[in-house]
Image: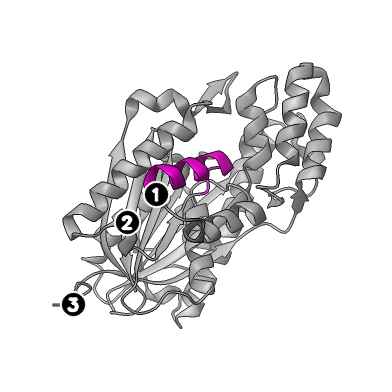
């Protein structure tokens, strides 16, 4: 029996980034210029070392100029978040549908996840208006899943597909991480400002046996590690909080969720030809490689996305999957595992088959 029979399929993927790009030398110089008076000599030395690391070369940010980040008013920040979240999501949706010859009339469901801004009503309603999606569409907005949010989003879309008739379900992950920019004498903020960026990804799910079949997915939550990776509010503003222990914690949780995913299917690590990991950072990628026992070949796409885009939070794992598909290395029958992790601490894994 074909294991893909009756399964939802990812028909297409499209990604979008804002046009403004910054390399690490420019970003580091900006922080030193505007915030060196807030940083201790030790922190300045750490900053220069982190920004000189080749793991990230450039990033896309939803700004016209870095200067707008300095003392940005909260009202301007949420307006910037809303503008770019809607525009990038729209670009990704249109491109994902166009790739498979569909239009907005074919969309019967829409799920949007984000963690870097909160608006009410949610982004989905702006997309319905901007793109002319049916006012009868089933739409949901998910918040608070952090960098791991793309896979829970996909799980909900898969469930929605069962009642969609001939329509398709669109999954959108969008983050404007620059809308949470903060800077102080805090290692978490120094690291965050060295790796985080902005972007969106859309995927289209349908019933046809074409594309990547969603065979299974699993999730694992470790609330005892909540404070190791999360946003916290200080003076009414989001501040990213990252533990120095995160590589070890995240890699062990990822290894558990991968085991949970593969074991019921009788699969082993060596049976999986393609791996799409959320690129949480160079040290985290290294820790996952060592914990699971992967070769560097399996991590090429993950590292390449980190280098060219940085960490865009939830959509980033779809950038990695898109990179794998663009390389043309996936053959019919190949297994692929997609893994995302983030605030919670949570980890999610999805088993795909070409």
Check residue 293 in the rendering and tell me which mark sits there, or answer none.
1
Write the residue at 37% across / 43% down: 254
Where does the N terminus fall, quadrant-wise? bottom left
Q: Position of residue 229 (x, y in %)?
A: 47, 30
Q: Is residue 219 left or right of residue 92?
A: left
Q: Which residue carries the number 3 mark?
A: 2
Q: Position of residue 98 (x, y in %)?
A: 51, 78
Q: Which residue carries the number 2 mark?
A: 269
- 199 lies above or below 236: below
Mark 3 or mark 2: name the one nearer the start of the chain: 3
Write the residue at 46% across / 56% down: 295
- 313 lies above or below 158: above
Q: Is residue 273 left or right of residue 314?
A: left
Q: Quadrant of residue 5?
A: bottom left
Q: Residue furthest bottom?
A: 101
- Tag 2–tag 1 contact (CB < 8 Å): yes
Mark 2 or mark 1: name the one nearer the start of the chain: 2
Measure the alpha-carbon separation of dots 3 and 2. 21 Å
């Amino acid at each position: 029996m074909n294991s893909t029979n009756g399964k939802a399929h990812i028909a297409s993927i499209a990604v979008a980034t804002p046009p403004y790009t910054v390399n690490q030398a420019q970003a580091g110089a900006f922080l030193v210029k505007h915030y060196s008076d807030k940083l201790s000599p030790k922190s300045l030395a750490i900053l220069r070392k982190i920004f000189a690391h080749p793991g990230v070369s450039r990033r896309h940010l939803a700004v016209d100029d870095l200067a707008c980040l300095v003392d940005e008013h909260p009202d301007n920040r949420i307006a910037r978040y809303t503008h770019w979240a809607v525009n990038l999501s729209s670009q990704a949706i249109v491109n994902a549908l166009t790739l498979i010859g569909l239009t907005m009339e074919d969309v019967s469901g829409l799920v949007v996840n984000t963690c870097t801004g909160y608006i009410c009503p949610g982004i989905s309603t702006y997309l319905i208006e901007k793109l002319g999606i049916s006012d009868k569409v089933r739409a949901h907005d998910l918040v608070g899943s952090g960098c791991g949010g793309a896979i829970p989003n996909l799980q909900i879309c898969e469930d929605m597909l069962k009642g969609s008739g001939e329509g398709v379900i669109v999954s959108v992950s969008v983050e404007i991480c620059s809308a949470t920019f903060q800077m102080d004498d805090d290692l978490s903020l120094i690291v965050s400002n060295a790796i985080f960026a902005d972007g969106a990804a859309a995927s289209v799910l349908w019933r046809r046996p074409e594309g990547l079949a969603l065979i299974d997915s699993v999730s694992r939550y470790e609330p005892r590690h909540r404070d190791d990776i999360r946003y916290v509010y200080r003076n009414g503003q989001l501040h990213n909080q990252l533990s120095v222990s995160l590589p070890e914690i995240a890699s062990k949780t990822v290894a558990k969720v991968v085991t949970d995913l593969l074991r019921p299917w009788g699969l082993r690590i060596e049976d999986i030809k393609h791996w799409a990991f959320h690129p949480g950072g160079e040290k985290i990628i290294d820790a996952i490689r060592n914990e699971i026992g992967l070769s560097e070949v399996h991590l090429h796409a993950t590292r390449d996305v980190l280098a060219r885009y940085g960490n865009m939070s939830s959509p980033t794992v779809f950038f990695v999957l898109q990179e794998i598909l663009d390389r043309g290395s996936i053959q019919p029958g190949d297994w692929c595992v997609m893994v995302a992790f983030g605030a919670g601490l949570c980890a999610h894994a999805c088993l795909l088959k070409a």
